[in-house]
Image (spheres, grey):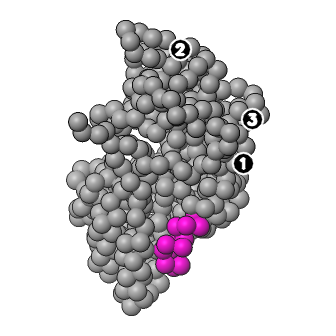
């Protein structure tokens, strides 16, 4: 009989007396402090350790930017702004949160297709770097520059002719709504110069959620070499090169954590090449999920225990309305379980096969499908690990009129 693959150990959190510890507090104490379930909780010490660990693995010349789309909770953004070198935003709403959090406007970049004219004007007024993703944006930025008397800072996002192999979502290569096709770049760069925009560099983002260091290294090398070739066509010296991110975390059985050493070694070689080939350039890595994903959990209380034709169902007070990703309805083709446990019975040795389902009137509301879990009762707290990214803000919280969930940083 073949053994089922298991999840990577969720050992980033300690436990005491059978309860998960987050930010040094037991799960039941946190639930009492929050006052209701469900809720997300993020551990600030784990966020610090993740940034410090990444810096230690990479050359010091690499700047780290937090892609706040992964978790835009203002308290999280405020903390991350003190830990990283810059923030990447994808809307005027995110831009406001980043600026309110104290992020340095000079190190904020604004990406995304379909930027409205008003948003582009706000970006110019704030002095942030706009990652241009369409020729349509150029005259709008030029007009905003003229009206405000400020230079529009721009980098051009390139849709390359390659993709990040093995990525969860491919965001480059082939027809894409993101960026400018590489074959269209020569003409667009001429237009950037003609309009007098303050050109600073290039942005490439080939894919996300990748656990294969070799694939990430290959994409970074190809991105660098493409940028080097295009630099000769640019209207100014290349000073900014965003190599994207793509660093994944292990969600599903059989997955292992990303090995950073080959990536650090590869980037060290690129930094050395750039000393002579692109002497004014600053390298940027733009990461969201990798920074925050493992530092957060989703907590929901069991409100019913049912047995249907021999199968145990643990019914909770939250589900896909708060955590769409864990339900499998946020990009999974074949649904797989996130790592899940009963957070107040963490030391239990007696297990049972059970499914954890939410309170919604749909069979899609499934947080754990026939997993081996500690035997749970009504009132216990179910925990979904790897929930610090694409959780509350990426979920349909108004669905079926249930109350929204809380978020806390401890």
Which quarter of the figure is the N terminus placed in?
A: top left
Which residue is rendered at x = 47% and y = 49% of the image?
9
| Numbered label attached to residue 59 | none
**Residue tagged by mark 2?**
305
**Farthest-out residue, front:** 349
- Which portion, as a residue range, is magenta? 51-63
Q: In this view, does 64 lie above or below 26?
A: below
Residue 88 lies, in percent from the top left, at 53, 57
**Residue tagged by mark 3?**
29
Disc with the residue nearer the chain's start (3 vs 1): 1
The answer for how far apart the CA atoms under marks 3 and 2 are is: 23 Å
Provide the secondary structure element on which disc 3 rests: helix
Which residue is rendered at x = 43% and y = 49% of the image?
8
**Residue tagged by mark 1?**
24
The answer for how far apart the CA atoms under marks 3 and 1 are is: 10 Å
Residue 212 included in the magenta stretch of the image: no
User: Who is closer to the viewer here, 260 or 201?
Assistant: 260
Residue contact at pointers 3 and 2, CB within 8 angstroms: no
Disc with the residue nearer the chain's start (2 vs 1): 1
Q: Is residue 175 above or below residue 138?
A: above
- Taking the image as drawn, is residue 3 in sight? yes
Residue 54 included in the magenta stretch of the image: yes
The answer for how far apart the CA atoms under marks 2 and 1 are is: 30 Å
Disc with the residue nearer the chain's start (3 vs 2): 3
Which residue is rendered at x = 29% and y = 40% of the image?
3
Q: Is residue 121 above or below residue 318?
A: below
Snapshot quadrant of residue 7: top left
């Amino acid at each position: 009989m073949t053994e089922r693959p298991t999840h990577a150990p969720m050992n980033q959190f300690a436990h005491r007396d059978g309860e998960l510890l987050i930010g040094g507090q037991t799960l039941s104490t946190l639930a009492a402090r929050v006052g209701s379930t469900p809720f997300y909780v993020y551990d600030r010490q784990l966020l610090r350790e993740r940034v410090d660990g990444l810096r230690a693995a990479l050359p010091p010349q690499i700047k780290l930017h937090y892609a706040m789309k992964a978790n835009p909770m203002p308290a999280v953004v405020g903390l991350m702004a003190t830990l990283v070198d810059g923030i990447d935003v994808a809307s005027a709403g995110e831009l406001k949160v980043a600026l309110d959090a104290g992020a340095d406007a000079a190190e904020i970049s604004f990406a995304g297709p379909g930027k409205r004219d008003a948003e582009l004007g706000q970006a110019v007024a704030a002095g942030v770097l706009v990652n241009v993703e369409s020729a349509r944006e150029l005259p709008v930025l030029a007009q905003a520059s003229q009206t405000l008397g400020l230079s529009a800072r721009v980098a051009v996002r390139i849709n390359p002719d390659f993709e990040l192999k093995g990525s969860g979502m491919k965001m480059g290569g082939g027809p894409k709504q993101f960026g400018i096709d590489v074959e269209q770049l020569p003409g667009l760069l001429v237009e950037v110069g003609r309009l007098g925009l303050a050109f600073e560099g290039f942005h490439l983002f080939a894919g996300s959620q990748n656990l294969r260091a070799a694939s990430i290294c290959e994409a970074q090398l190809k991105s660098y070499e493409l940028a080097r070739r295009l630099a000769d066509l640019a209207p100014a010296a290349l000073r900014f090169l965003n190599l994207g991110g793509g660093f994944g975390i292990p969600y599903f059985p059989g997955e292992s954590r990303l090995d950073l050493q080959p990536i650090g070694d590869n980037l060290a070689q690129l930094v050395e090449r750039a000393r002579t080939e692109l002497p004014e350039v600053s390298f940027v890595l733009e990461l969201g999920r990798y920074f925050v994903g493992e530092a957060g959990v989703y907590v929901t209380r069991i409100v019913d225990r049912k047995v249907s034709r021999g199968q145990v169902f643990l019914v909770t007070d939250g589900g896909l309305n708060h955590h769409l990703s864990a339900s499998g309805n946020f990009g999974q083709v074949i649904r797989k379980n996130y790592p899940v446990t009963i957070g107040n019975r963490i030391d239990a040795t007696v297990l049972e096969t059970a499914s954890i389902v939410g309170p919604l009137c749909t069979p899609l509301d499934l947080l754990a499908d026939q997993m081996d879990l500690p035997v749970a009762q009504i009132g216990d707290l179910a925990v979904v690990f790897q929930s610090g990214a694409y959780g509350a803000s990426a979920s349909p919280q108004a669905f079926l009129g249930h109350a929204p969930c809380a978020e806390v940083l401890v």
